[in-house]
Amino acid sequence: MVDRLEDLLRRARAQGAVEADAFMVEEEIQTVQVRMGQIESLKHARENRCSLRIFTATGSASATSSDLSPPALGRLIDETVALARVTQRDEYSGLPAPETLAREVPELDLWDREGHRLTVEAKVEQARRAEAAALEADPRIRNSEGAEFYDRQARVAYAVSGGFAGQFRVSSFALSVTPVAADNGHMERDYWYSAARKLGELESPEAVGREAARRACRRLGARKQATAEVPVIFDPESAASLVRALAMAASGPSLYRGTSFLVGRLGEPLAPPSVTIVDDALRPHGLGSRPFDGEGLPSRRTVLLDRGVLQSYLLDTYSARKLGLRATGHAAREGGGGVTVGYTNLYLEPGPHAPEAIIRSVDRGLYVTELIGFGINFVTGDYSRGAVGYWIERGELAYPVEEITIAGNLREMYRGIEMIGRDLVFRDQTAAPTLKISRMTVAGH
């Protein structure tokens, strides 16, 4: 793949490109879905694409082709050069300086050759076992919206006319199930999942099924809740969304467009000293790991928030130039050939508290297990989202609640983090432990 990209760049330069880079992906995805023990769907997709970005003396353009044959790649060069001739070059656009490009491709153990040898029949069996475990876990589990086994493998290559070329392979596997619980005419659904780079690191189908059943059953009998201002505890899944919100506010495009409340806040305290948020692209077999970014810059561990103080933004080369800063190795390639900013393995470091102790610390408050909608204004930090969870009375989860909204402001919420759990688990690209915020408005009836 690297040879093909380097040949593409040579031909682009011969046609007038001053500098250019190219990105190639070959991926294969298989998805197996079952419902009530029967196969609902089997999907197998192969997708190839090549993205070319060129810069001429007066313009720039990018284009993508899913046809990797020599004639198609020739047309990709012709069309991208033609596009560049009718566009005007942005003064901030261009490739990274050659001296900043990666010098090596570290081995991060991201591909599971053996895992992809699992047969379709075995994948179906994994999904069936997960669903069966959910159905057998509790007599109140009466139905299922199904279970799914997913696996993906891809080969990724990148080359830049400044001198870097590299490639790597990745795998990802996931197993999920969504049971439906019913009791006294009331029905609730919930789900659980496991995801990993290595097949052997997935939780067992039985563990996934039992946890999904437990989560569905505990939502039965949900009540509405009167409006109040109380402490709010986020479980790890919902706490991770607060970490993602910070990353979105800290991303280069949000900053240079002036649509983030973090503009000009580098070096300022945003949260208590107990809060450290890290994006680690080099975490071995992490779900978001990569040996270099979408522009060939070396991957690294970036401390976004260090003991409560904002230490870094997430920047690609273009946004770094717009802001007068240095790129942080967070360029990601879009399907259309463009570059955007993305995080890798983003997490909030664990604290000293057991989740049960955090719940016991609340006399009256809310424990959030699911967030609905996307009610965040990143300009002001105003936050308002639908939520599902449990009402806390005298340090105990008293009953499930639904049809509520939690509201606050992200700046006040980060400052209001009072306790951090020790239950950090890397289940996704974003992870966080249980988190307690001192006060938020819980709007009910």
Image: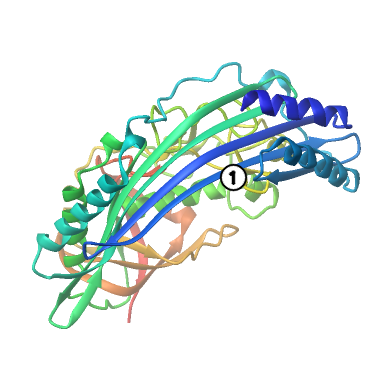
Q: Position of residue 172 (x, y in %)?
A: 39, 40
Along the line of sight, which residue is nearer the eye, 328 or 178?
178
Is 12 situated left or right of 111 in this image? Answer: right
Residue drawn at x 30%, y 67% is 388
Depth order, front residue of 149/340? 149
Q: In which quadrant of the rendered view does residue 60 lie?
A: top right
Q: Is residue 312 left or right of residue 134?
A: right
> Looking at the picture, how far across and down is residue 72, in whole percent?
73, 41
Residue at the spot of label 1: 251
The x, y position of residue 189, in whole percent, is 26, 68
For the N terminus, give its image quadrant.
Answer: top right
Q: Which residue occupies the foreground of this view, 26 or 314? A: 26
| Front in this rendered view, residue 309 or 367 | 367
Toward the left, the furthest residue is 139
Q: Quadrant of residue 284?
A: top left
Q: Residue at x 18, y 61 (%)?
A: 213
User: The C terminus is located in which quarter?
Assistant: bottom left
On the picture, is 172 further left or further right than 202? right
Residue in the picture at 22% in, 42% down? 353
Amino acid on which disc 1 is placed: Ser
One can see residue 71 in this view: yes
Circle 1 — which element?
A: loop
Q: Is residue 73 above or below residue 414?
A: above
Callout 1: 10 Å neighbours few (<14), some, many (20+)? many
Whether residue 268 is visible, yes or no, is: no
